[in-house]
């Protein structure tokens, strides 16, 4: 028996590469002159891309590390299929979030002006958080799990508040921080209860320990299980632990909100899956109903709040995305709740596969939505939903991509990826005979459609006209009407049929050229194409969403029993 | 007829279903510009024409001796994790619907090419054509799908395109109507999905052929009842069955002509087709339980639809012609549902026949309503029947009037025309319902349905009288009316004609500086001036040649299947016998 553990560095590579890049960026920042700091972003993105590449040798999902010397099947780190898929989501999500930040940081002059993001710190914090999120799904003991979760979350507080001279940021971060710390404390309390009952911190060991636990400790263990779930439910933004979400997203820079909604949420979900399905596998009767109630409440509350978002309010885009991400968390929890009712390991594996498949779809599509929102915000600046009006006229491909993303989120054709993910979720509920939850999930699809489709419809409407009359003139004459005077005559005669509108007709005639100019702006006024990094982000997410739509098996293959662990 | 092997017809069916979708994608990616408007219309006609040719070829190659089993079958694995297969095929039930869909889509594409409707903010026909093509793919796939999840997918595919068609190219109140349509239907179809999942998970397969052959074996009675309830709600919303119909009148009234044609002609058939194709064979015990309720709702729909129409057609009620046709659809689909509820081959065959007949006749009615609106500027029945200023189609546009009367008579079920056989067979089925169903209940339903046919005849004849007949205006008051500018409101089309000509001459003679008021006076005098002709209303333009090309095929079809019902019944009957095998047990 050797005292020196053999460490499988290939299995550990994804989180390690990100962590090393984080430190490297922080150190490089100290020595780079101001004008070359934009290279920091390149380094960070390259590090994340490299980490994604290190997932390739892990695709078989059979590597482990940090195993007990005497029992080599008990390990603290396992790069199984579940871990690799979640790492793919979080690293890919972090990379897209990095791409979305690049243009803003490239434009930025100096790090100290109002509204600036300090670049060295930003990249370091983003990478640090991503390394935690990459570690989390592979952790197989509660200590590593909690540690990874805190590494994921702590830098995120700072990221939210990082923008200089911003009022909303620090307040949002404080709210985020306080609620999060309370949740973590509760989780730690729960873990201590569970440890008392089972005598192990390894997830597999807990399951064995709880099976043979002293019946007198039953109440303690049940309380421990529920308390442990609280912290993870907080990270996934499940109701009633969701109150930080809208304020935090609104206060954070948009790419950071994207990061929180995908990477942070997926990490929390991964923790929840690990704890419930591995450590508390036999206690499904305790956590299944809890999660079922949480799921139903989460999707309903999120959808209703999203429905009430006024499209013309400032930052309404972010608000809608925040509430929609709460609602989507509800769908993510449905199969997990169903797993609690499963009778055997295969049933659990199938249900959890549905959650992971939904997470894959949600990550791709939500990042794509954020990418287009960042692009639109570059021009309009106020993050209003109404800024998206007429996007199809200005920028057809971007608009089609966003429309596709939104329909995927809503789960309707042509967004087949979303449709199949929703079918997977509802199917898991039906299979577990959770009839009420299945109906609630189905009805929520309808509620959610309202705000997603309202947004998608805005894209294809003409840009806001000055007045209805002017728009009509523009419509009747069409693009071919080069002579605006002709339009004036048409307007004059058209309105003259009703008495006493001669003056109105005349004024219509003078408005007509203005209307035409508005509807058909000269090429210079058209919205510029998205900058290269954002265009790449939109294109990658759109292609991935398309691939998932054409071949849903790519994600739904995860629901086959025994695939994940 | 033509003999082709499955290796030819299967790819043909797959191509027919996917071609419109591919064309729609191409259209969306086409570079924009004024010339693309015209190209889009032509592409639409070419593609829908090719699809119609394809379906006719399929019909010609169809083996009538084996109309009960799916032919031209494609069966490819798609999502093995869920047992979703791209399983397509046609049998005697789906073949007529496929041909009808292809025909109506072609007519709609031609309609868009010849009369491009102006969308909101000048939206051109390119988007409309693309949406129509997506609708066509969704519809054809729904009728050809042989896998429950694929059926659901195709069923949902039509939602978003139809929403955009109504909300962008529709008339007044289009936004609210579009929302109502999409939310109602989606709510129904997600409940339907729950039913599909219940059936699929219990039976272990989503394949409709396997499920139909099992005739409910492997599904407990409770499961069947729950499944029929869930699936039935989804299909009943689409059909629409009273009391889930309230989205329909709004959607039809607001939709543009092509939208109404497709909505009434084929989209409503999803519901009844789904009942026959899925519910009857898959859950026979469940539908047996619900059949009396279904029949009761069906006759309520018949009576309700006719009474609503009678209320709309009354003078002074402000009824809208398109709205009236929509409510009449509620009544006609009630007959279809009644036929299905009898669970007898007679009734179900009648239902399928009435399905097709309603598709043809209602499409024709909506096209005619569109033509009337184009000429008179309104579909308001009171204004169309206005004393002295109304449409008076017999006098002013005789061919249009005659065709409208013909279609109305077909719709009320005159023997010899398409509307007759379906309703007759449905009622015949109700006279002698399937074993185990309460005969008195169905006989009462039959009596009520019979009353419904009378009411239907009453309102349709009134529509014809009010829109087509009418008195010509009296000479003296007419002159006074004409002098009042408001008179033009009743007949905007001639007013515009008359108004633009003097305006154009005015411009030509250098009077361009004349104010609108001056032009208005000029218009007034121009129409009122020649004393001899002022008493006569100007003739409405009668059917153009391109309109005749649109309408006459449908009218001919109405006559054909009315005179030769065996054409359809021979196709549907073998398949119906097979599907109903489980019900009698």
Image (cartoon, coloured by chain):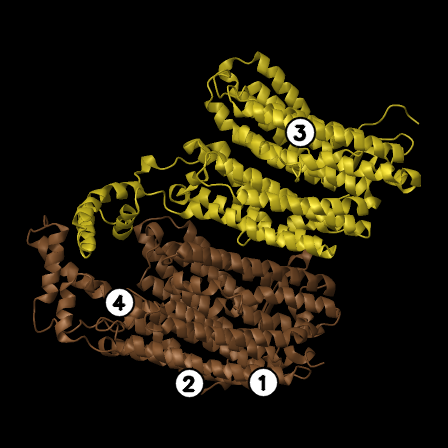
Chain colours: A yellow, B brown
**Within the image, what quadrant is residue A21 found in?**
top right
The quarter of the picture where the C terminus of chain A appears is top right
Mark 2 falls on what kind of element?
Answer: loop
Q: CA distance from mark 2 to mark 4?
A: 29 Å
Pinpoint the chain carrying mark 2: B
Residue bearing mark 1:
B443
Answer above or below: position of A523 versus B272. above
Q: CA distance from mark 1 to mark 4?
A: 45 Å
Q: CA distance from mark 3 to mark 4?
A: 66 Å
The quarter of the picture where the N terminus of chain A appears is top right
Q: CA distance from mark 3 to mark 1?
A: 67 Å
Mark 4 falls on what kind of element?
Answer: helix
Point out residue A393 in the picture as x, y percentages from the top left corner: 38, 44
Would you say residue A98 is visible in this rendering? yes
Pointers 3 and 4 in contact (C-beta within 8 Å):
no
Q: Nearer the viewer, residue A222 or A369?
A: A222
Q: CA distance from mark 1 to mark 2?
A: 22 Å
Answer above or below: position of B61 versus A1. below
Residue bearing mark 3:
A179
């Amino acid at each position: 028996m050797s005292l020196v553990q053999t460490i499988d560095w290939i299995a550990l590579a994804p989180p390690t590469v990100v962590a090393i890049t984080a430190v490297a960026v922080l150190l490089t920042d100290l020595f780079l002159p101001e004008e070359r700091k934009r290279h920091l972003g390149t380094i960070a993105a390259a590090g994340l891309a490299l980490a994604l590449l290190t997932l390739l040798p892990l695709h078989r999902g059979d590597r482990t590390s940090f195993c007990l010397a005497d029992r080599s099947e008990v390990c603290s780190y396992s790069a199984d299929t579940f871990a690799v898929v979640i790492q793919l989501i979080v690293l890919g999500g972090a990379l897209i979030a990095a791409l979305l930040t690049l243009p803003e940081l490239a434009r930025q002059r100096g790090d100290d002006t109002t509204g600036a993001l300090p670049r060295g710190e930003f990249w370091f914090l983003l990478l640090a958080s991503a390394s935690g999120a990459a570690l989390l799904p592979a952790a197989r003991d509660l200590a590593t799990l909690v540690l990874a979760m805190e590494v994921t979350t702590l830098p995120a507080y700072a990221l939210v508040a990082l923008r200089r001279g911003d009022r909303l940021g620090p307040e949002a971060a404080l709210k985020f921080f306080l609620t999060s710390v309370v949740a973590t404390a509760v989780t730690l309390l729960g873990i201590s209860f569970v440890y008392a009952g089972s005598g192990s911190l390894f997830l597999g060991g807990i399951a064995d320990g709880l099976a043979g636990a002293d019946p007198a400790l039953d109440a303690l263990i049940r309380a421990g299980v529920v308390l442990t779930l609280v912290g993870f439910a907080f990270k996934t933004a499940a109701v009633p632990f969701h109150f930080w979400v809208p304020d935090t997203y609104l206060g954070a820079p948009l790419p950071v909100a994207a990061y929180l909604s995908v990477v942070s949420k997926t990490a929390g979900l991964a923790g929840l899956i690990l704890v419930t399905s591995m450590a508390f596998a036999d206690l499904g009767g305790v956590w299944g109903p809890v999660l079922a109630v949480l799921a139903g409440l989460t999707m309903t509350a999120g959808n209703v709040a999203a429905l009430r978002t006024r499209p013309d309010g400032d930052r309404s885009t972010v608000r809608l995305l925040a509430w929609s991400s709460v609602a989507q968390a509800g769908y993510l929890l449905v199969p997990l709740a169903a797993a609690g009712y499963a009778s055997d390991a295969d049933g659990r594996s199938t249900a959890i596969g549905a959650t992971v498949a939904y997470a894959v779809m949600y990550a791709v599509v939500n990042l794509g939505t954020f990418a287009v929102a960042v692009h639109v915000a570059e021009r309009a600046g106020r993050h209003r939903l109404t800024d998206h009006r007429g996007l199809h006229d200005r920028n057809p491909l971007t608009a089609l991509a966003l429309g596709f993303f939104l329909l995927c989120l809503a789960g309707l054709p042509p967004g087949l990826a979303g449709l199949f993910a929703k079918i997977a979720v509802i199917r898991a509920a039906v299979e577990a005979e959770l009839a009420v939850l299945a109906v609630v999930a189905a009805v929520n699809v309808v509620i959610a459609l309202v705000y997603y489709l309202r947004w998608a419809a805005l894209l294809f409407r003409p840009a806001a006209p000055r007045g209805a009359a002017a728009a009509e003139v523009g419509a009747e004459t069409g693009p071919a009407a080069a002579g605006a005077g002709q339009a004036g005559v048409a307007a004059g005669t058209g309105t003259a049929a009703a008495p006493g509108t001669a003056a109105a007709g005349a004024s219509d005639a003078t408005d007509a050229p203005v209307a035409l100019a508005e509807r058909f702006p000269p090429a210079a006024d058209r919205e510029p194409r998205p900058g290269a990094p954002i265009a790449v982000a939109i294109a990658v997410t759109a292609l991935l969403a398309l691939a998932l739509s054409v071949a849903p098996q790519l994600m739904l293959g995860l629901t086959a029993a025994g695939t994940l662990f | 007829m033509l003999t082709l092997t499955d290796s030819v017809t299967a790819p043909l069916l797959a191509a027919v279903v996917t071609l419109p979708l591919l064309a729609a994608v191409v259209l969306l990616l086409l570079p924009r510009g004024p010339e693309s408007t015209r190209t889009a219309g032509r592409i639409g006609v070419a593609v829908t024409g090719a699809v119609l040719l394809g379906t006719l070829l399929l019909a010609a190659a169809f083996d009538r001796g084996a109309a009960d089993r799916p032919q031209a079958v494609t069966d490819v694995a798609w999502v093995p994790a869920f047992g979703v297969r791209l399983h397509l095929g046609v049998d005697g039930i789906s073949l007529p619907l496929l041909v009808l869909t292809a025909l109506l889509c072609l007519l709609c594409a031609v309609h868009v090419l010849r009369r491009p409707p102006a969308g909101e903010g000048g939206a051109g026909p390119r988007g409309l054509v693309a949406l129509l093509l997506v609708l066509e793919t969704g519809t054809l796939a729904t009728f050809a799908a042989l896998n429950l999840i694929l059926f659901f997918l195709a069923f949902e595919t039509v939602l978003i395109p139809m929403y955009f068609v109504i909300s962008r190219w529709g008339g007044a109140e289009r936004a609210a109507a579009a929302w109502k349509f999409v939310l109602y239907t989606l709510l129904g179809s997600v409940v339907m999905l729950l039913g599909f999942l219940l059936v699929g998970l219990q039976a272990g397969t989503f394949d409709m052929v396997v499920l139909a052959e099992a005739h409910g074996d492997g599904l407990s009675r409770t499961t069947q009842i729950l499944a029929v309830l869930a699936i039935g709600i989804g299909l009943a919303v689409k059909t629409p069955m009273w009391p889930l119909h309230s989205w329909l009148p709004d959607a039809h009234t607001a939709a543009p002509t092509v939208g109404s044609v497709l909505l009434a002609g084929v989209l409503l058939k999803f519901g009844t087709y789904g009942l026959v194709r899925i519910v009857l064979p898959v859950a026979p015990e469940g539908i047996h339980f619900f059949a009396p309720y279904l029949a009761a709702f069906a006759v309520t729909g018949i009576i309700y639809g006719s009474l609503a129409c009678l209320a709309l057609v009354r003078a002074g009620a402000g009824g809208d012609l398109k709205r009236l046709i929509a409510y009449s659809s509620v009544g006609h689909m009630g007959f279809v549902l009644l036929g299905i509820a009898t669970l007898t081959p007679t009734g179900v065959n009648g239902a399928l026949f009435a399905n097709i007949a309603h598709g043809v006749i209602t499409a024709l009615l909506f096209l005619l309503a569109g033509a009337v609106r184009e000429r008179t500027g309104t579909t308001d029945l009171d204004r169309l029947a206005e004393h002295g200023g109304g449409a008076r189609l017999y006098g002013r546009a005789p061919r249009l009037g005659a065709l409208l009367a013909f279609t109305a008579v077909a719709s009320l079920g005159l023997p010899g025309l398409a509307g007759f056989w379906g309703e007759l067979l449905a009622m015949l089925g109700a006279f002698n319902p399937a074993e185990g169903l309460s005969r008195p209940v169905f006989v009462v339903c039959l009596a009520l349905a019979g009353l419904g046919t009378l009411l239907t005849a009453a309102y349709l004849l009134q529509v014809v009288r009010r829109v087509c007949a009418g008195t010509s205006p009296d000479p003296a008051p007419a002159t006074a009316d004409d002098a009042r500018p408001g008179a033009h409101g009743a007949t905007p089309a001639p007013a515009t004609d008359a108004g633009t000509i003097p305006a154009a001459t005015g411009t030509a003679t250098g009077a361009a500086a004349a104010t609108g008021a001056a032009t208005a006076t000029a218009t007034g005098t121009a129409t009122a001036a020649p004393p001899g002709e002022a008493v006569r209303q100007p003739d409405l333009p009668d059917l153009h040649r391109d309109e005749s090309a649109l309408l006459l095929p449908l009218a001919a079809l109405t006559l054909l299947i009315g005179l030769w019902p065996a054409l359809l019944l021979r196709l549907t009957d073998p398949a119906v016998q097979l599907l109903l095998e489980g019900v009698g047990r």
